[in-house]
Amino acid sequence: MDPFDFPTEVSDAAVRARAVGALREAGVLLPSFAQLSEPSTIPEAVLARLAALDPDAADPANLFRVHWHNDAARTGRVETPGYIEVPRSLTGVAARVVVALGERFPMIGAHKVLAAYACLVPRIVAGRFDPSTQRAVWPSTGNYCRGGVAISRILGCRGVAVLPEGMSAERFEWLDQWVADPADVIRTPGSESNVKEIYDKCAELERDPANVIVNQFSEFGNYLAHYLCTGRALERIFEDLRASDPDLRLAAFVAGSGSAGTLGAGDHLKEALGARIAVVEPVECPTLLYNGYGAHNIQGIGDKHIPLIHNIMNGDLVVGVSDESTDALDLLFNSGEGQAYLMARKGWSAALVDDLASLGLSGIANLLGAIKTARRLELDERDVVITVATDSARLYQSERDKWRAARYPDGFDEVDAAEIFGAHLASSDGDHLLETTHRDRRRIFNLGYFTWVEQQGVTLADFDRRKDQRFWQGLRGLLPVWDEMIERFNHETGLAGRAGRAA
Ligand SMILES: Cc1ncc(COP(=O)(O)O)c(C=O)c1O
């Protein structure tokens, strides 16, 4: 599909009628984007259904948990999204560093299920996807395709995951349990940064009209869901902090870029609160910093290209973080030896150590990016830097075991833990950090040409119009249009105002 051909009206009435029938049959009531950004507006009947429902069940009501406002048990709803304020004893900076928790999202324990929903639903309500005959294909490095497979299963259609074979074993184990057929997990060569290989596979699959590629890297629904839902959620967290300290400023929003969806929240935070936007990337694959390339293990980010939905011209900083640091800190935070060292020698509380398990590898990268940003901008105690942990450490036990065995074949002890602390936290430096000028932004923007215009067939005019902030501002008008289409669709399935049916 042409990513600029936005679904704003019904394209094919027959396809849409079949989708209405399929979702009625599956008992699926679709949440609107407004409801996912403001879950207090979710109807009582749905909330009543959710009360007794496992957040990881393939049940239509769990679509109403695809937001940031789930409580720690992931069963109830909270006004302020879950977050951790990371103390100065860890960050070493005066600025207040907070991390929003993606692990509270349903089914996959990562916020990428929001992106998956946002990319597919506009097509369904516009009659551009037939759940009764077509397969939704989810190109990804692991979390988005899990989200896509979960959404597909709830909607009663086939979902196909396309991901590099080198991603964490936990991702594949999850997929094995959720796909309808083992052939629906397609492994492409390489690891995190091998997105070109995923595109090639998708191009091959797309020749069959039964396969619909739902490409997070170019679907503006991904950008828009984060602009609205993640942007508002992070604003709520900031408001929570400011309630007890009215002088606080939101100095920066920091996020790694995989599809660049999450970065969409930055556009909201810049408009609403004047936050700067910092994008994190692996030093081992420094595409934005140096037009570079390479393999790395910060799973989820650093994909060796510039996504079409990345609003490069609105960014302020690019921050490089090494996967040496994220792998090492992951071991420090999540091993008995590391935790013992942090509590006994560094005085960290058991609660802080416990909280750190909520950060997956890219969450640790974001935390380091936030610290580097605070240092570079010389932020003080009135400044807040906000970032996200897309998923948690629980998805990386196999990676941790591999890394530990390779680095510490004779055992890992407290001296090793102290070395990691000294090398990767205490002396976190200002290297590989760019405060972007207009010229830097143009250089990065231009790099996207080779993927999108040369390889993927986007017209030059469409590619170029993303330079102008008015393009991105204009996109936001799609959200109320989509919500209206969702509402009409729900009306036609006959499930509006009800909770849907149990799976
Ligand atoms: C673990 C993890 N972190 C970060 C990201 C990057 O998020 P985004 O695609 O919104 O840029 C992803 C994306 O898949 C991810 O899986």
Image (tube, rainbow, N blue to C red):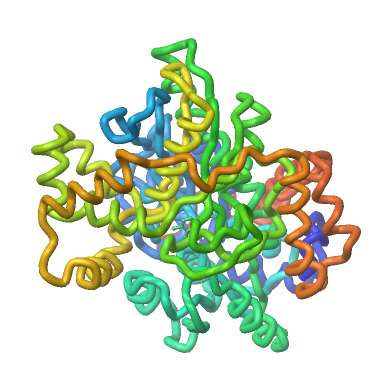
Using the image, determine if residue 365 lies above or below residue 17.
above
**Towards the viewer: 359 or 282:** 282
Q: Residue at x 62, y 83 (%)?
A: 201
For this view, does 263 lie left or right of residue 96? Answer: right
Using the image, determine if residue 388 lies above or below residue 290.
above
Q: Quadrant of the C terminus?
A: bottom left
- Locate residue 26, reporting x and y percent: 51, 68
Q: Residue at x 81, y 57 (%)?
A: 9
**Towards the viewer: 120 or 2:** 2
- Locate residue 465, reporting x and y percent: 86, 51
Specify the farthest residue to the right.
Answer: 461
For this view, does 364 lie left or right of residue 34? Answer: left
Using the image, determine if residue 42 lies above or below residue 377.
below
Q: Residue at x 79, y 58 (%)?
A: 6
Quarter of the image for residue 403 reads bottom left
- Locate residue 406, reporting x and y percent: 24, 72
For this view, does 275 lie left or right of residue 142? Answer: right
- Locate residue 96, reporting x and y percent: 40, 26
- Using the rendered image of the protein, determine whether residue 158 is visible from the camera's viewpoint: yes
For this view, does 119 lie left or right of residue 325? Answer: right
Q: Residue at x 63, y 25 (%)?
A: 274
**Towards the viewer: 208 or 353:** 353
Count of all numbered marks drawn on residues in the image? 0
